[in-house]
Image (cartoon, rainbow, N blue to C red):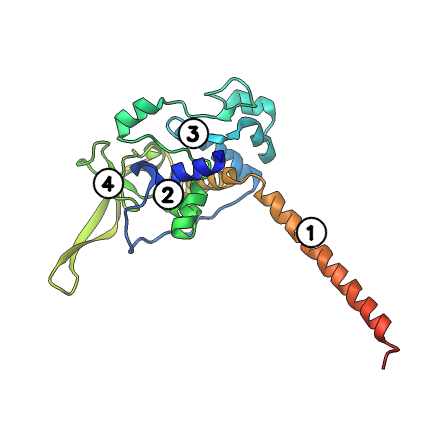
């Protein structure tokens, strides 16, 4: 029941992580990697930039040992909201404060990739595009907007890494005399700490970690599945050989 409540929270929650882009939404392919190096970098980014407002309360810190980290590394570098590695990755911000600041309580992100997958086909692609599509908009309370989710309540927490960009829109006739606004592209107005390729790779690592934490055992499950299929295939061959041997003298 707790898992179902988490899915419901993510699927129904706040304008902080939701869709408002409509049918013309284009998603970039997320280069997801489950290599330990990528997941470790993603975990670092998640703890430093996401865990301030978004929790991952259905994942415990000690599960990060699955991506090659030791308890000492977890305790010394990633635990800012807990005292023991067996505790859940709870959010640092109070729910009432978050609601007052952003207009809604930021949802738990443990299964956000799976929730977005049910809506868009690929939660990883949605997150990857979303985190690279913030732009400056002084009309918004936070000063930021997003082309994937228009009028988003969430500020661009990674702006120091990406830099600042503005979105260019053009009005076009829809063929019925109505003017519609179309996104033309981004223009960088202030460089960040990272070049575009480096920022994209870090976002890919962050998305990979978010996808991983939705089902930490997924790689093991897939590996077991391959072994099971191989064993069943071998047994099928043995059964076929036995059948031929049994029926060879039957006319």
Where residue 18 sits, quadrant-wise, is: top left
Left or right, 154 with reference to 2: left
Mark 3 or 1, nearer chain start: 3
Query: At x 59% / y 44%, what residue is drawn?
Result: 219
Q: Which residue is mark 1?
A: 227
Q: Which residue is mark 4?
A: 151
Closer to the camera in the image, 251 or 238:
251
Query: At x 15% / y 65%, what residue is drawn?
Result: 175
Q: Which residue is mark 3?
A: 55
Where residue 141 sits, quadrant-wise, is: top left
Q: Residue 94's x, y, as percent?
A: 36, 22
Q: Residue 186's x, y, as percent?
A: 26, 47
Mark 2 or 3, nearer chain start: 3
Residue at the extreme top: 83
Name the element at disc 4: loop
Q: Distance from label 2 to label 4 (Cα)?
A: 24 Å
Mark 2 or 1, nearer chain start: 2
Name the element at disc 1: helix
Q: Are marks 2 and 4 in contact (CB under 8 Å)?
A: no
Q: Distance from label 2 to label 1 (Cα)?
A: 40 Å
Q: Which residue is mark 2?
A: 196
């Amino acid at each position: 029941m707790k898992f179902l409540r988490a899915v419901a929270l993510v699927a129904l929650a706040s304008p902080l992580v939701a869709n408002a882009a409509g049918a013309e939404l284009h998603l970039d392919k997320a280069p997801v990697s489950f290599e330990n190096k990528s997941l470790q970098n993603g975990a670092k980014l998640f703890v430093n930039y996401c865990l301030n407002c978004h929790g991952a309360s259905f994942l415990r810190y000690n599960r990060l040992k699955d991506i090659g980290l030791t308890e000492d590394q977890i305790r010394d570098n990633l635990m800012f909201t807990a005292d023991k590695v067996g505790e859940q990755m709870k959010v640092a911000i109070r729910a009432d404060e978050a609601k007052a600041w952003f207009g809604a309580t930021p949802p738990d992100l443990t299964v956000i990739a799976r929730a977005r997958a049910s809506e868009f086909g690929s939660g990883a692609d949605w997150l990857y595009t979303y985190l690279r599509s913030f732009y400056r908009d002084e009309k918004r309370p936070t000063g930021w907007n997003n082309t994937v989710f228009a009028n988003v309540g969430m500020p661009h927490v990674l702006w120091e890494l990406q830099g600042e960009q503005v979105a260019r829109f053009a009005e076009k006739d829809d063929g019925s005399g109505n003017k519609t606004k179309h996104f033309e592209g981004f223009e960088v107005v202030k460089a960040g700490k990272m070049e575009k390729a480096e920022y994209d790779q870090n976002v890919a690592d962050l998305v990979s970690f978010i996808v991983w934490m939705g089902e930490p055992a997924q790689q093991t499950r897939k590996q077991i599945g391959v072994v099971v299929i191989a064993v069943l295939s071998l047994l099928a061959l043995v059964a076929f050989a036995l059948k031929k041997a049994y029926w060879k003298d039957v006319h």
